[in-house]
Image (tube, helix red, strand yellow):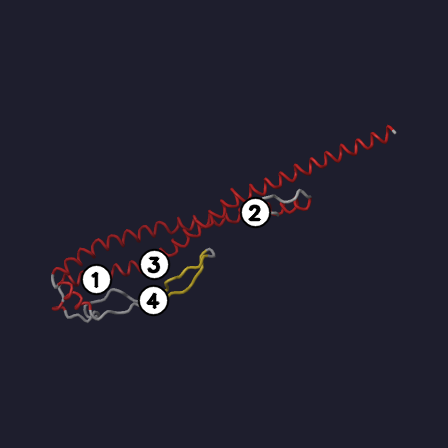
């Protein structure tokens, strides 16, 4: 195929276009089924994800006012001293695939919420507000980690759905119609050639009969 022009009007190119249109039709059907599966999976995850976000928002709405109250008592420096030493939270993550989409799955996480003894904080050294703040943020962290898998999967599924929809639109609205137009043009040209050849043969036969 030359740049800016369609294929030459030959039988071979017509057959080639027929085969390409068949492949486009099959590819479009496969992509539509994939898109439907992605939409179904997104709807399946949407309600749990919405509920998890509500729980996170509610816990955050409780935790941050508690933090302001805790800061008002010992101040930032005092509260930071109570939080020392920090701790590492090690989680186990593995690669997985959902509908052929690579995702990272959080397999295990350590317990986040701890008692005062586990925090190594003597009860007289921490106020009730600071203790409540610590518990609230530990619960918030647990909610965030528990929602991480679903949120990451939703994001990847949404990206895959957007990409699949663009591919379907390209095949249906651009490539398919372009190939159809090329096929129709070649058929018209071949039909005209066949009619001209038929008329030429009729003239030859008439001339032969008259001679």
Distance from disc 2 to disc 3, alpha carbons, whole Å, reads 38 Å
Left or right: 67 with respect to 89? Answer: left
Q: Quadrant of residue 88?
A: bottom left
Local packing at callout 4 (Cα closer than 10 Å; few below 14, some 14-19, many 20+) is few
Q: Which residue is mark 3?
A: 148
Between circles 1 and 3, the one closer to the viewer is 3
Q: Of label 4 and label 3, which has the lower sequence position?
A: 4
Q: Quadrant of residue 73?
A: bottom left
Distance from disc 4 to disc 3, alpha carbons, whole Å, reads 12 Å
Q: Evaluate if marks 2 and 4 touch, with contact meaning CB atoms under 8 Å apart.
A: no
Left or right: 85 with respect to 1? Answer: left
Q: Which residue is mark 2?
A: 24
Q: Which mark is residue 135?
A: 1
Q: Evaluate if marks 2 and 1 touch, with contact meaning CB atoms under 8 Å apart.
A: no
Q: Secondary structure at mark 1?
A: helix
Q: Secondary structure at mark 3?
A: helix
Q: Which residue is mark 4?
A: 91
Q: Is residue 141 above or below residue 37?
A: below
Between circles 2 and 1, the one closer to the viewer is 2
Q: Evaluate if marks 4 and 3 touch, with contact meaning CB atoms under 8 Å apart.
A: no
Q: Of label 4 and label 1, which has the lower sequence position?
A: 4
Q: Is 18 in front, or is 25?
A: 18
Local packing at callout 3 (Cα closer than 10 Å; few below 14, some 14-19, many 20+) is some
Q: Is residue 197 above or below residue 143?
A: above
Q: Evaluate if marks 4 and 1 touch, with contact meaning CB atoms under 8 Å apart.
A: no
Q: Is 13 in front, or is 149?
A: 13
Expressed as whole percent of the image width and height from the top left, the position of residue 61 reads: 22, 53
Expressed as whole percent of the image width and height from the top left, the position of residue 196 reads: 73, 34
Q: Residue at x 21, y 67 (%)?
A: 115
């Amino acid at each position: 195929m030359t740049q800016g022009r369609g294929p030459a009007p030959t039988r071979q190119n017509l057959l080639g276009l027929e085969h390409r249109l068949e492949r486009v039709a099959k590819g479009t059907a496969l992509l539509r089924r994939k898109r439907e599966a992605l939409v179904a999976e997104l709807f399946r995850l949407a309600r749990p994800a919405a509920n998890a976000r509500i729980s996170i928002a509610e816990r955050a709405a409780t935790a941050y006012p508690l933090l302001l109250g805790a800061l008002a008592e010992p101040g930032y420096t005092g509260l930071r001293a109570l939080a020392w030493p920090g701790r590492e939270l090690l989680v186990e993550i593995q690669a997985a695939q959902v509908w052929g989409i690579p995702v990272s799955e959080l397999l295990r996480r350590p317990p986040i919420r701890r008692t005062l003894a586990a925090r190594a904080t003597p009860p007289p050294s921490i106020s009730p507000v600071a203790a409540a703040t610590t518990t609230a943020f530990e619960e918030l962290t647990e909610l965030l980690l528990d929602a991480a898998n679903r949120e990451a999967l939703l994001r990847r599924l949404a990206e895959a759905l957007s990409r699949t929809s663009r591919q379907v639109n390209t095949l249906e609205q651009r490539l398919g119609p372009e190939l159809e137009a090329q096929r129709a043009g070649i058929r018209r040209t071949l039909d005209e050639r066949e009619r001209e050849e038929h008329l030429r043969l009729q003239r030859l036969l008439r001339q032969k009969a008259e001679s």
